[in-house]
Image (cartoon, rainbow, N blue to C red):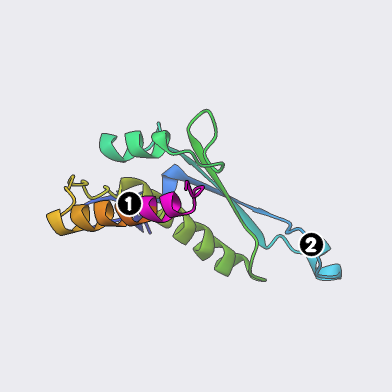
Amino acid sequence: MPLQLSARVSIPDDELEMNAIRAQGAGGQNVNKVSSAIHLRFDIKASSLPEFYKERLLGLKDSRITAQGVIVIKAQQYRTQEQNREDALERLKALILKAIETQKARRATKPTRSSQRKRLDSKSKHSALKKSRGKVGY
């Protein structure tokens, strides 16, 4: 079943390379016997994603993306292989959707007249206060 990113864009299963590996960390004998962690690899350049998606993904500064343009995700949070597979797919989907988000364009604004006046009044008060601390000349 393909990974659905949006109504029009999805990633076919044959473009996702998933391997079961043994998880790290504590877990007793079970962790040494069972390959419950998932190692997901997704080649951005060789994928069927639209060019816009590919450019955005390759432009990301993310440690999970290699220099060759391959996304590597290691999922080992859960005890079962199925849960880790779902987690890896969700993390891949979140990464891709985050990459294609467009920032809202910033519109330059000017300070209002009253805020300018308040700022200048504050400066002149501060200046007067500092002048009053000077030496007294008789």
The residue wearing badge 2 is: 25
Residue 124 image point, x, y percent: 30, 52
Q: Residue at x 51, y 28 (%)?
A: 68
Residue at the far top in the pictured view: 68
Question: Quarter of the image containing the N terminus?
Answer: bottom left
Q: Residue at x 39, y 39 (%)?
A: 57
Q: Earlier in the sequence, mark 1 or mark 2?
A: 2
* Up/down of 11 relative to 79, above or below: above
Residue 55 image point, x, y percent: 33, 33
Whether residue 7 is visible here, answered yes or no, is: no
Residue type, mark 2 in image: Gly
Q: Is-magenta flag for residue 66? A: no
Q: Nearer the viewer, residue 138 or 86?
A: 138
Q: Is-magenta flag for residue 130? A: yes
Residue 50 image point, x, y percent: 27, 39
Residues shaded magenta = 127-138
Helix, strand or loop for disc 2: loop
Q: Specify whether 46 is left or right of 87.
A: left
Q: Residue at x 80, y 70 (%)?
A: 27
Q: Specify whether 33 is left or right of 113.
A: right
Residue at the far left in the pictured view: 113
Q: Are marks 1 and 2 in contact (CB under 8 Å)?
A: no
Residue 53 image point, x, y percent: 31, 40
Q: CA distance from mark 1 to mark 2?
A: 60 Å
Q: Nearer the viewer, residue 17 or 110?
A: 110
The residue wearing badge 1 is: 123
